[in-house]
Image: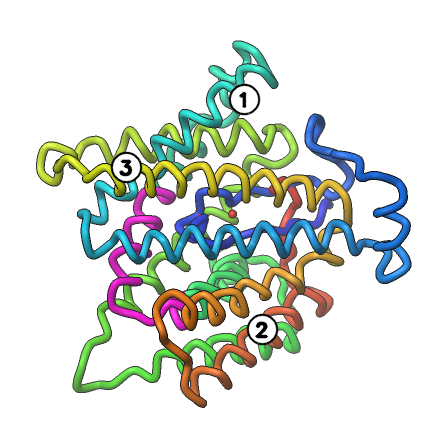
Amino acid sequence: MHHVWQVGGGLCHGGCGTSTFPTNQQPSGFALSSPAPATSVLTRIHPHAAAILIMVTALCLAATGGALMKQLAGELPPVLLAWFRFSIYGVILIPLAFWRAGRACLRPSRPVVQVVRGLLLAAGNTSFILGVVHVDYANAIAILYVYPFLMVALSALMLGEPVSRPAWAGVAGGFCGVLLVIRPDPAALDIGAIFILFTGFTVAVQMLLNRKLGSESDPLLVSMWGAVVASVALSVSLPFVWQIPAGYQILLVAFIGGLSAFSHTLMIVAMAKAPAEEIAPFTYFEIVAGIIIGIVMFGTLPDGWAWAGMALIAVSGIAVKKLPGVLKMRRREKY
């Protein structure tokens, strides 16, 4: 059985770039070669340093795109913002999909699964935008990383897959970390955190659906169909939320869409260059990126409890991915 791994992130956080690769299969067309001198220098540092660096870069770009979405969220309706994002993302991916697969890209494998996945993308991305308006950006990214723990729990409870006791301890630690970040107040409902937790749930379900797609689906085509289905689904709401964006808003949304496509492509390249288990721990660098971006763009800094929660989330997440008996995700490369 192939192991499975997912890249989530950024506002690919809503899941735009969430997909997987079989660990024994590299995505054709994306296995880019690096210049020999640069590769040799990086290899001396770590055997997979180049892939790790590419992944960290992709996560930083994804986190930046999410922060820009947060800025626009107070100016444009969240549903409209999500529609713009997926529409631009689709416009970028459709020509690439035709170049890659020709007319075969019009016949997706497991179309029902693809449609459900696209609907989850639309719901998760919109929910993240709604939530990030009310939550500090670094905290929002940390809360979003509840999805690996939810995925393990759902796989055990709904699919009956075995999970070891140490792994369950890691899942419990991850949930405790999220609670430290949120610190829910029974007297005041934190609607922003609830929206982001829902986004994490949609990402976890997407991961389980990705296992249905397996190795039969090209990751680029999966991404394209996700963007197309999400944009079509969100189009239903346009008559109720439509407004003409200002010129700078159009440019910013276009930039976010391009950033999403570029960061997703970098994730694919990184995952083609190294085993999933080597890269997986570094996905939590996105939390670090969220902290830095929160300071620079929004002037916010997590408090002591949030720092402790973020550390617990990262440590528990890495432990869950490393411990035996844990559901691991099939790498087919994730908002």
Q: Residue at x 53, y 24 (%)?
A: 109
Q: How is the image coloured?
A: rainbow
Q: Residues within 10 Å of mark 2 (few under 14, many from 20)?
A: many
Magenta residue check for 98: no
Classified by dominant secondary structure, the portion drawn in magenta counts as helix
Q: Amino acid under label 1? A: Leu
Q: Amino acid under label 3? A: Ile
Marks 2/3: CA–CA distance: 35 Å
Report the residue that reaches farthest toward the top: 103
Report the residue that reaches farthest toward the front: 248
The residue labelled by disc 3 is: 250
Where are the magenta residues, as a range?
120-140
Q: Amino acid under label 2? A: Ala
Magenta residue check for 136: yes
Rendering coords of residue 208 (x, y %): 51, 48
Q: How many marks?
A: 3
The residue labelled by disc 2 is: 314
The residue labelled by disc 1 is: 96
Q: Is residue 269 left or right of residue 68?
A: right
Q: What number is the disc on residue 239? A: none
Q: Secondary structure at mark 2?
A: helix
Rendering coords of residue 133 (x, y %): 25, 63
Rendering coords of residue 154 (x, y %): 48, 59
Whichever of labels 2 and 3 marks the residue nearer the N terminus, that label is 3
| Foreground: disc 2 or disc 3 | 3
Q: Residue at x 34, y 69 (%)?
A: 298
Q: Nearer the viewer, residue 330 or 275?
A: 275
Q: Nearer the viewer, residue 84 or 168?
A: 84
